[in-house]
Image (cartoon, rainbow, N blue to C red):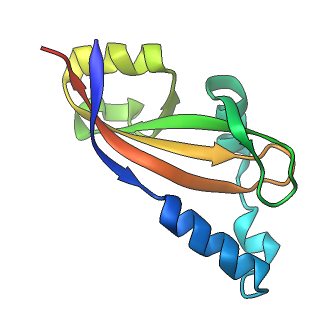
Amino acid sequence: MFTYQHEVSHEWQRRATLRAYHAGLVPKEELCDADFLLRAAAEHHGEASKRTCPICDRDMREVRWVYSEKLGRRTGTARSEAEIDTLVGEVGPITVHKVEVCPHCHWNHLLQEWTATPVR
């Protein structure tokens, strides 16, 4: 069992990015650049987002990525909550990023990051 600690929200940056886009300061191509790996991870490891895409207004997915030197080759991979629980049990605290991804227009943005730690 694990808990999330030390949350960092990237919502302010998301809003600022979207304001710049709507003001014509940032081209769509710069924002809608999710690569194949990110889109596939969102489809297979992600979950439905409560929000619609801010660019095309279609359904989005949210996916979690894990990072830690202790994870070896598993660092930088998409994982489910159950897999994160297993990893935290194996190696201790790890960093988790939650990214929203639009499979239609390829919008993507980092939403939150946390440290997943074992519950003692």
Q: Is residue 7 above or below residue 82?
A: below
Q: Is residue 38 shown left or right of residue 55?
A: left
Res. 6 image quadrant: top left
As rendered, which of 89 and 2 lies closer to the eye? 2
Comparing 8 with 65, the one in front is: 8
Q: Quadrant of the N terminus?
A: top left
Left or right: 89 in relation to 36: left
Q: Position of residue 72 (x, y in %)?
A: 31, 33
Q: Residue 64 appears at what percent x and percent y?
A: 51, 35
Q: Looking at this rendering, what residue extends furthest in the left direction?
A: 120
In percent of width and height, residue 51 lies at 71, 43
Residue 42 coordinates in the image, percent (x, y): 67, 34
Residue visible at 39% across and 22% down?
84
Residue at screen point 78% across, 78% down: 22
Identify which residue is drawn at 79% across, 71% down: 29
Eyeballing the image, is 80 above or below 66?
above
The answer to whether residue 37 is left or right of residue 3 is: right
Quadrant of the rendering where the C terminus is positioned: top left
* Quadrant of the rendered image containing residue 47: top right
Q: How many marks?
A: 0
